[in-house]
Amino acid sequence: MTETATKNRYSFDDKNHIHILDGRPLKGTTTVIREVLPAPLVWYGSGQACKTMGWYDRKKGRVNFLPEVDGLPILTGVFDKVKKMTVWEYLDFLDKAYSAHDDYKNKRSGEGKETHAIVEWAIKEAIKNNDGFLQSEKYEDAQIERFAVWGRRKKFLFSEAHVYSEKLWLGGALDFVYADNGFYIGDLKTSKSIYESQFIQTGMYDAQQLENGFFTSFGERIGNPLEIKGYTIVNLQPKGDVKTLVFYDTATLRNFAKNITDMHTMLRSIKAFLEARN
C-alpha cells in the first residue's frame, strides 16, 4: 500500500480522544488495556480512604498516634476532630474518605500530564534543532534534566507519534522512539512502579507501527515501519531516582497485541449480551 493511498486515512480527535480510520473510531490502545487488565487498586483505594480517617501507613509503622482505641490506632488530630462533629459533618467527612482515592488519582494524573508535556517539548526541540539529541547543557527544568541524564546519548526519532492497525482495528500515540544500537519504543511513566501492562502497551504500539509506520495526529506519515529491538519504560517521578527497564522479547508482545484485542472484543460482546437481558 502506497503512502498516497494511506495518507490521511487516519486522524486523531484530540477533544474526544478518539483515533479514527476512514471516518470510523478505532479502539484505543490504553482503553483496551484498561478494560481487559484493570489496575489492581482495591487495597490501594481502600488505603487512601482509611488514611483520610486517620489510618496509618503500614509500611512506615505507627508513629504520632494516640493509644489504640478499640484495638485500632487513631491519628490524634483526626480523632479529636471526629469527636466534635455533628452527624451531618461526619457524613461529609465519610464522603471525603470515599472519594479520597479518586481525588488522589486525579492529582497524580495532572502531575503526570505536566511531566509528559515538558519532556515531550525537550524531545521535539532535540529532533528539530539537534539531530535528535538532547542538549548537552543542563536543563533548567529539574524533571527534564532528570530525564536527560538517561537520554542524552540517545538519538530521538519521534515524539508523540501516532500509530494504527487496520487488522486489529486499533489506534494509539506512543511517547517516543529512539536509536541506541537499534531502535526502541519508549514510554514515559510517572507511576510508583513499572508494571506489566506498560510493556504490553509498547508491544501493542509496535504491532501497529510495523503494519503502517508512524503518523502525525492529522494522518501525515512521518516514518516507515521500523524493526524494534526493545521496549523501554522510563519511570520518572517528582521525587526519587529515575528507573528504566528494557524488555527485549518484542515478538511475543507483538503477538499478544492480537490476543488482547480479541479478548477486548469478546468482553464487550458479553457485556452487551448481559445489558440486553438485564
Image: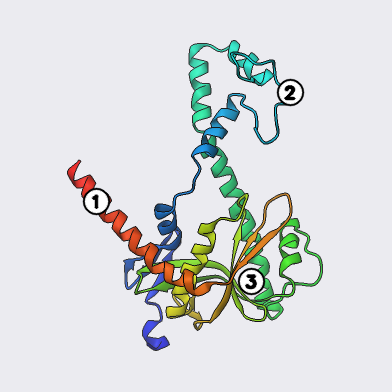
Image quarter in which the N terminus is found: bottom left
Above or below, 269 against 74 in this view is: below
Outermost residue on the right side: it is 137
Q: Secondary structure at mark 2?
A: loop
**Pointer 3 or 1: first along the chain:** 3
Q: Nearer the viewer, mark 2 or mark 3?
A: 2
Residue with the mark numbered 3: 124
Which residue type carries mark 3? Lys
- The residue carrying mark 1 is 272
Front position in the image: 227 or 174: 227
Q: What x and y, as percent, mark residue 72?
A: 61, 19
Q: Describe residue 176's horizontal placement relative to residue 208 as left or right.
A: right
Q: CA distance from mark 2 to mark 1?
A: 51 Å
The answer to which of 217 and 275 lies nearer the viewer is: 275
Q: CA distance from mark 2 to mark 3?
A: 48 Å
Residue 3, above or below 80 = below
Q: Residue 117 location in percent, x, y?
A: 61, 60
The residue singled out by tag 2 in the image is 64
Q: How is the image coloured?
A: rainbow
Q: Could you say which is closer to the camera, residue 254 or residue 113?
A: 254
Amino acid at the residue labelled 2: Asn
Tell me if I can see residue 218 in this picture. Answer: no
First in sequence: mark 2 vs mark 1: 2
Q: Mark 3 or mark 2, which is nearer the start of the sequence?
A: 2
Q: Quadrant of residue 178?
A: bottom right
Asked if labels 3 and 2 touch by Cβ distance under 8 angstroms, the answer is no
Determine the image quadrant of residue 243. Answer: bottom right
Question: Looking at the rendering, which quadrant does residue 211 occupy?
Answer: bottom left
* Image depth: mark 2 or mark 1 in front: 2
